[in-house]
């Protein structure tokens, strides 16, 4: 009986430690994203803007850029979906700003949209008989009706993408990103 209680106690301690490790990892990741959101780059924006484009290209995005400004908007990129299932896609709006106090910041907004394809055919397919002009027209319409499909209204939302901002920080300013990671470990061991 004592062995069972000891084994149970050991299992509880191990489970608690694993939970704490998981929580600490999540807290560290949240800390990193929050700090990346406030990061001020000490390099001039024109020096690292090509790094922004390179990361987006690696992620599979193409974009349109606002001339004379550090603003770009990616094209929608499909994330998948089935023939009749929901299809999702995403895009980014990235803006770089030079601060009056010196330095530069990046802000990334991510847009997500979901569209639900629907098939409305095969509900009322009529088969006309006979060889008259009207019967042929009804057959043609029945075939057209059987292949009709549509899309339910698209849902879209936009939010700041701190994950991509963190990835950009790690790419553009690895020394600052490493310091933030060390700070995150200290804050959430």
Image (cartoon, rainbow, N blue to C red):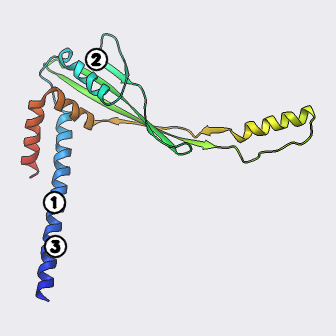
Q: Nearer the viewer, residue 128 or 173?
A: 128
Instruction: Tell me which label, 1 or 3, sits earlier in the chain.
Output: 3
Q: How much space separates mark 2 and mark 1, taking CA atoms? A: 42 Å
Measured from the top left, where is residue 4 in percent x and y?
A: 15, 84
Q: Label 2 crowding class (10 Å Cα cut-off): few <14, some 14-19, many 20+?
A: some
Q: Label 3 crowding class (10 Å Cα cut-off): few <14, some 14-19, many 20+?
A: few
Q: Nearer the viewer, mark 1 or mark 3?
A: 3
Which residue is identified by label 2?
Answer: 70
Q: Secondary structure at mark 2?
A: loop
Q: Nearer the viewer, mark 2 or mark 3?
A: 3
Q: Residue at x 34, y 11 (%)?
A: 67
Measured from the top left, where is residue 154 in percent x and y?
A: 52, 37
Circle number at residue 20: 1
Circle number at residue 11: 3
Measured from the top left, where is residue 106 in percent x and y?
A: 24, 26
Q: Residue at x 11, y 44 (%)?
A: 184
Direction from residue 12 to residue 80 in the image, left or right: right
List the single residue furthest toward the front.
131
Q: Tags 2 and 1 in contact by the CB under 8 Å rule?
A: no
Direction from residue 20 to residue 75 in the image, left or right: right
Q: Secondary structure at mark 1?
A: helix
Q: How much space separates mark 2 and mark 3, taking CA atoms? A: 54 Å
List the single residue furthest toward the bottom.
1
**Dividing the picture into quarters, in which one does residue 84 lie?**
top right
Measured from the top left, where is residue 127 in percent x and y?
A: 83, 44
Q: Residue at x 14, y 68 (%)?
A: 14
């Amino acid at each position: 009986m004592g062995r069972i209680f000891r084994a149970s106690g050991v299992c509880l301690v191990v489970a608690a430690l694993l939970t704490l490790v998981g929580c600490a990892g999540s807290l560290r990741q949240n800390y990193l994203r929050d700090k990346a959101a406030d990061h001020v780059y000490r390099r001039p924006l024109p020096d690292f803007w090509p790094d922004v484009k390179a990361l987006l290209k690696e992620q599979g995005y193409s974009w349109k850029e606002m001339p004379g400004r550090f603003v770009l908007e990616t094209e929608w990129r499909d994330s998948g979906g089935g023939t009749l299932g929901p299809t999702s896609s995403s895009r980014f709006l990235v803006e770089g700003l030079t601060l009056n106090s010196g330095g530069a910041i990046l802000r990334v907004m991510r847009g997500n949209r979901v569209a639900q394809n629907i098939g409305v055919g095969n509900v009322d397919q009529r088969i006309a008989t006979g060889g008259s002009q009207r019967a042929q027209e009804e057959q043609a319409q029945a075939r057209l009706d059987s292949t009709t499909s549509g899309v339910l209204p698209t849902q879209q939302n936009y939010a700041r993408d701190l994950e991509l901002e963190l990835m950009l920080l790690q790419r553009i300013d690895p020394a600052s990103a490493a310091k933030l990671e060390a700070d995150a470990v200290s804050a959430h061991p």
